[in-house]
Amino acid sequence: MRFTSERRLDDGVLERKFTLGEIPGILWTPGAAPAPLILLGHPGGLTTMYARVEARARHAAADGYASATIELPGCGDRPRSAAAEEARADLRRAVAAGEPVDGEIVDRLVLPLVERAVPEWRATLDALLSLPEIGGPVGYSGGVIAIGVRLAVFEPRIAAAILFAGSFVPRALFEEARRVAIPLLVLLQWDDEGNDRQSALDLFDAFGSTEKTLHANMGGHTGVPRFEGDDAARFLSRHLT
């Protein structure tokens, strides 16, 4: 891990950009150390998503948590995949036509992303936990939900997860969901135009966790109520402190 820049935000949070091999990312740390760590998931395009991710990191820092995020494969300035671009175009055509999104399209788009992103997240976690200012335990918060499912199954250092139900999930991930055992808080926007509501409900039902909570709110994809941030903080406080 190589830090490429750093700046102190107006609330005292230290923001540092880094690279890990070809993976770009950002780390936010509060004043106290060592701090528990939250991995912040997002749908890609870190420059575009920065304002929203930074706001989540500041909220976490106010509660004493460090936060980190990375750019997803094929997003931002990272090399594009021709197969993924073709699948994304097929998905957009189906959505624009008001047609059901075929599972084969979802598999072509999401499964390769999960296969690449999860090892990158785990390598990033290895590097972050080697820093003296970062301690355990570790939580995951955000989307793409399929990435969160895979991490919850195969990354034992993640103690709890907040999953955003706002993206398509391959059927193979439903079987993996049955193996998830950590506490979960799932956020679902009821009127999300880009999400299959019933699929999200079926995925929640499939999770094997004995502690799992679903918060469903009215509104579209970006309309998550601000009070959900407070509920998320209470959830993380129960499991990361």
Image (tube, rainbow, N blue to C red):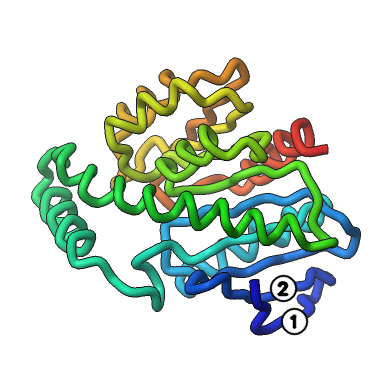
Quadrant of the snapshot with the N terminus: bottom right
Residue 65, percent from left and from top: 78, 52
Residue 126, image x and y in percent? Answer: 65, 55
Measured in 3D between alpha carbons, the distance from the residue under mark 2 to the one under mark 1, in whole angstroms, is: 5 Å
Foreground pick, 222 / 21: 21
Q: Secondary structure at mark 2?
A: strand
Q: Earlier in the sequence, mark 2 or mark 1?
A: 1
Q: Is residue 38 left or right of residue 51?
A: right
- Describe residue 38's horizontal placement relative to residue 79 as left or right: right
- Residue lying at 51% horizontally and 46% vertically, measured from the top left: 224
Give the image quarter of residue 230: top right
Return the residue at label 2.
15
Which residue is the site of mark 1?
7
Q: How many residues crowd mark 1 within 10 Å: few (<14), some (14–19), many (20+)?
A: few
Please report the residue visible at 50 percent of the width from the left and 57 percent of the height from the top. 120
What x and y, as percent, mark residue 141? 59, 46
In the visual, does 111 lie left or right of 148? Answer: left
The answer to whether mark 2 and mark 1 are in CB contact below 8 A is: yes
Q: Amino acid at mark 1?
A: Arg
Q: Secondary structure at mark 1?
A: strand
- Residue 232 position, x and y percent, is 66, 40
Image point 65% across, 46% down: which residue?
Answer: 229
Q: Nearest the camera: 31 or 125?
A: 125
Figure check: 129 above or below 161: below
| Res. 177 image quadrant | top left
Q: Residues within 10 Å of mark 2 (few under 14, many from 20)?
A: many
Residue 87, numbered circle: none
Depth order, front residue of 118/229: 118
Q: Quadrant of the C terminus?
A: top right
Left or right of 20, for residue 195: left
Looking at this view, name the residue that lies furthest to the top. 210
Name which residue type carries label 2. Answer: Glu
